[in-house]
Amino acid sequence: MSENTKNIVDIDENLRLLGTAHVSTTSVNLVKQQISEYEPDLIAVELCDSRLAALKKPEGIDNEQLLKIISDGKSAMIILQSALSLQQRKMGIDSGEKPGAELLAAINIAEEANIPFELIDRDVIITLRRAWHKMGLREKMRVLEALLIEDIDDEDFDLEELLEDSDLLSNMMEDVYKIAPNAGHVLIDERDAYLSAKIQQIRDKGKILVVVGAGHLSGIQEHLKKPTMESTSRLSELNEQPQKPRWPKFLMLAIPILLATAIGKSAYDGDLTTVWESISIWLVLNAVLTGLGVLLARGHPFSIIVGALASPITSLNPSLAAGWFAGYTQLKMAPPTGKDASDFLEFSSFFQMFFKNKVGRVIMVTSLGNLGSTAGTFLAAGLISTGLL
């Protein structure tokens, strides 16, 4: 058996857990050795379909995917996910391995040897959405500060220590419970329960080797002590995506209705000066703040113009967003190349990823354009309503 026996746990004669560090060459070798020695009938890996696809084809994001990100309003989620990936990659720079290399090695060996494999992790987007939903505003600010501001390049990472306590998401924020306890519950505790439940579902498939981040070992062991039905019954609950609150849409719909009603009354009363001032405030603030957001994202001049022109109109319709139009224009005016796509997740800093790379810039133009439009809407509504009152 391997020297890293503390990372190898035999639950019974047909179930072995192998804890790995996602940035360690040692872990890649350990996975290969354990598959050879243990000769499993099935290999279970801490991956979901989207993460496996990213590991197998790390070219980045193509233009069709970018259009979908823009239309689905997922640019903010991509920024968070990419920031998390950036921190993970930074820790892997000196180890000589890309994050997740040992997980991909397990899949590759399984395919070459015709050994069945199972992906047992929850979809990363669901995990991120649940974590974001659970966090309060202060927690979100702390997490973003930890991800985007703190410079971890100056820190020394002990790969053996990482091997003892590693997880694709949790080791990016070593103090996750301190800065964001609700996020920690989702990123770590919920996934321990999810991984355990998926393992319970496949216990009858012969001799199984489970490859997971070492940080999950203790949690999985505790959950495996519970009755199978109790564990697996939680899968549906843990896979639920948080419902978006309806009040923002109602508010964004109510604002133009109330303003239109008030302006209409002013027009009916013959107060055309107030009408003109109100319309001017709406047009100028929406256009200027949206254009400023796109400008800060270093968007193309046409993207700035399109976003600014669209904002006063899209702000009247909660199903539209000015950032979408700006992002689409950016994509057309400065289309990312294949190299941009492949480089997107290779840069060493957040600024380079989202302000210098064309893929990242499209995402930032969309996000900051939407942020500017929202700010313009609320500020204009406040100024107009004050004047009307």
Image: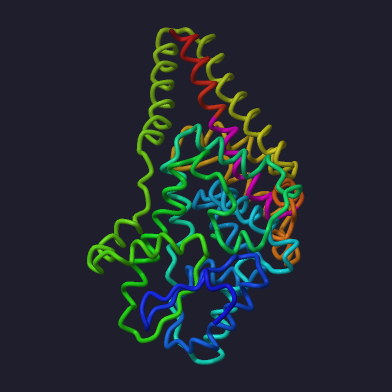
Toward which corner of the image does residue 182 lie, by quadrant?
top left
Against 268, residue 179 (above or below) is below
Residue 206: x and y, percent?
A: 36, 86
Residue placed most toward the observer, 92 or 363: 92
* Callout count: 0
Residue under the image location 62 percent in, 45 percent down: 147
Residue 189: x and y, percent?
A: 41, 53
Toward which corner of the image does residue 293 lie, by quadrant?
top right
Work out which quarter of the rendered image holds the C terminus and state it: top left
Residue under the image location 54 percent in, 67 percent down: 51
Q: What secondary structure prevails in the magenta region?
A: helix
Residue 300 is inside the magenta segment? no
Residue 371 is inside the magenta segment? yes
Q: Find the magenta span and give its range.
A: 357-374
Say whether residue 339 is left or right of residue 272: right
Against 363, residue 106 (above or below) is below
Residue 125: x and y, percent?
A: 48, 57
Residue 186: x and y, percent?
A: 42, 50
Work out which quarter of the rendered image holds the N terminus and state it: bottom right
